[in-house]
Amino acid sequence: MARLEHHIGGNTAYGEYFKGIIDEVRIYNRAQTAAEITTDMNTPLGGAAPSLARTTSGKPGASTTATVASSDGSELEICTSKTAPVHFTTPGTPPDDPPEDIRHLTLGKDDIVVKTAKTDPAACAGSPCTVTDDTVMRIGGTGIDKTAAVIGLRLTELPDGAAVSEALLKLGTPTCPAGPCPADAVITATPLKSPVTGDSKGSDLTGDADTSTTPYTLPLSTPQADISGSEYQWLLLTSDKDDVVNFSDAAADEQPSVGLAYLPAGPPSKVLNLTVTGGDASATASWGLPESNGSVALLEGYDVEVIDSGGNVVENLEVKDSWAAISGLANDITYTVKVRARTAHGSGEWEAKTFTTRAVPPPAPNGGAGCVLEPDPQQRKATNEESGRQAYIDRVKHYYQAQDAVLESRATSIWDAPGVTADAPSTAKLSLLNAALISEREILERIGLSRTDSAVALDHPVVQSDANGTVHVTATVSRTWRFQEAESSETKATTSAVTPLGQVEPSDPTISIHVFDRCGNMTIIIVPLPQHEDSTDFGSEGPDCNSSERSSTMAGTASDCVPDYALNPRICETIRAAGNRCKHFSAMPGRPYKGMTFRASGVVGWKPNHAVRTTQLNIAKMRIWTQVYMTDSFRQKYGKYQFVKKMTISLTTTFCGKIKAGQLTVSYPPGFSPSESSQCHEKKDESRPGKEVHNYPTDGHDNGLLECSGGFPTCDIGTFKFGFEAELKLPYSDPQKPDGRIPLRCDSGWHNPRD
């Protein structure tokens, strides 16, 4: 008979547990009738036996009586008060979420700076009045005697880096010099953009209102409001009545105060789910974001230490993303990797994991027909002497060097590049790029440029083999070359890299994972993220677009411009661009906190121009999506703070082109202007504070027109690209603290307008 395990209070397979106390457990070896269930439900365990002591559930130190009922109805006592109490916990029971360390501070009258001024521009001998210090908040009046008060808070007792979640301003008891105060009067507290100084004028205060914040209303009957988010700003106090109302008068029953609730700053918690995979004298490590940043500060990065078996630190790394490539190790050694998160307020505790390096077997000399797969990939074992690490690194370099040969005209096609044969390990992968490489070379020739001095370097390469014999080479690929103008010997240096999607000329070095099959053939190229993503980092950000939603967006119209949902599963919109060429692109998401994700994607569709010279290029569709996704738990924890309530998304949309003569202009849509980059035009805009979605264009007009002007008759748009730079700005209340910024950047890559 098979042994069955019964778990009471938890489902260990799915990590689901009962939070509470369970007592009076019965286990039966047969099904019970309804009458039996009712009888047992109303009978304490042990029945009427006087020797059985039934305990009260949940009391510390008490024992719980349990029985097992047999098939004949008799009960066998298995644990009674005669035995010593046994305490246990359900395996894997997660601890309760730690409560937030919310602290409180009350500011009295002496911590509130009061200034007053008449607001009429001619109130002081025909000129504006200067704001002056006062001990009483004087509000109201008519004509040139109309007066307003401004107040500021002394926050010297608030700890550095504290995040204020509540700032309850109480103005105290009002007094009115002319008699009883109007019961229906309302005081308005308006945050100001600028500090109030001895040079500030009363007539300028209203114009300095911070329009990003809704003014606070304080009815005279209960003159109080939560001003959290504005505690570092000056507040302009005005009244909707002409009656003069005073606060903080010495004779008032209640004086002004501000009650602060705040989260003190501290270091972040431990990183989660640290995973380390050893490779050939190398390793990769990945982890989840810490459950808490320790404050509202952004994560600045992570410290990574690698320690050998003798306790010596052999590698120190500082990384931005939640994974690391570790190289320069030795084989057949057990190392320890330690990782900790870091913010402006300190570093968290170390999380550690051990791993062992193993040499990867050398690849087969040739792929294709020359390779025979072993029935068991483990038949080929590697030793230090036969490591295949360098052979795989060389194969990755050759993949890019073969492309350079075509782009530099040293080879007419990929088939003529050095080392490319029918059975070479990267031939199949390179053949997919042949048309794009030839097109890129022809574009350069049309605009009078040639490419030379190409070089490729692989930084921090990690070579790993899995149980199936597949080999992964993770490395930062850096490519450099020089452009030379056909009419002169003048050259200019350029840096670039090939992206995982095989684009010929993106702009920045890219960290890529090159995957080889058991025959040593390159099969695919992928990016580390989401390959190394931890599932706890994004949680439930909201629903992806399901199949029915996607189908409805496409109903009735054939389109060759459907978003790639693998890149961004949250785009539910299909761009109509039937008959046009189209390219979707997405930036790697930014995750400044556990439960907050910033995503950005774009699309461009264009109508191919087959003329001899392209002086105009019709952009049929262009669109950019940016959005901040937050889990429910994140909103509950941080939604009350300034950095969430006033976050903004700035977006710079860019068109770039390469032309032989003349200038590239964006004739439509309006608003594009030349950027610092040569032959690029850009348009900038920003979302309203607190808005979680910001797209371009916002008005639905998503077509455009690029033109080549001047330089007749040789003006020709040889190639173009469309892209964006998006930035999520998280403002903090304290003006001395820099705002948190999460930048995302991506573009379509260069495209031939004739294709």
Image (spheres, rainbow, N blue to C red):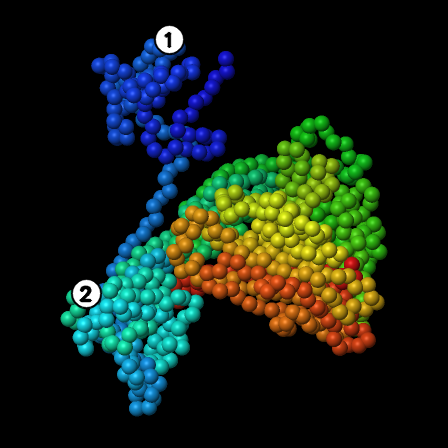
Question: At x 82% / y 57%, what residue is drawn?
Answer: 410
Amino acid type for the residue under numbered disc 1: Asp
At which x and y percent is residue 355? 53, 37
Q: Looking at the image, which is closer to me, 301 or 687? A: 687
| Above/below status of 51 relative to 157 | above
Q: Assess disc 2: are there few (<14), some (14-19) or many (≥20) residues with their C-alpha within 10 Å of its C-alpha.
A: some
Q: Looking at the image, which is closer to me, 517 or 633? A: 633
Whether tag 1 and tag 2 are in contact, CB under 8 A, the answer is no
Asked if residue 674 lies left or right of residue 629, the reply is right
Q: Looking at the image, which is closer to me, 469 or 647? A: 647
| Above/below status of 452 relative to 551 | below
Residue 404 shows in this picture: no
Question: At x 28% / y 16%, what residue is drawn?
Answer: 46
At which x and y percent is residue 78? 32, 15
Secondary structure type for disc 2? loop
At which x and y percent is residue 115? 28, 76
Secondary structure type for disc 1? loop
Residue 96 shows in this picture: yes
Q: Which mark is residue 72?
A: 1
| Residue that extends furthest to the top in the rendered view of this protein | 72
Q: Quadrant of the C terminus?
A: bottom right
| Above/below status of 365 relative to 110 | above
Quadrant for residue 28, please give it: top left
Asked if residue 45 lies left or right of residue 390, the reply is left
Asked if residue 298 lies left or right of residue 419, the reply is left
Amino acid type for the residue under numbered disc 2: Glu
Q: Assess disc 1: are there few (<14), some (14-19) or many (≥20) residues with their C-alpha within 10 Å of its C-alpha.
A: few
At which x and y percent is residue 356? 55, 36
Question: At x 18% / y 72%, what residue is drawn?
Answer: 180
Mark 1 or mark 2: name the one nearer the start of the chain: 1
Q: Which residue is mark 2?
A: 254
Question: At x 19% / y 65%, what residue is drawn?
Answer: 254
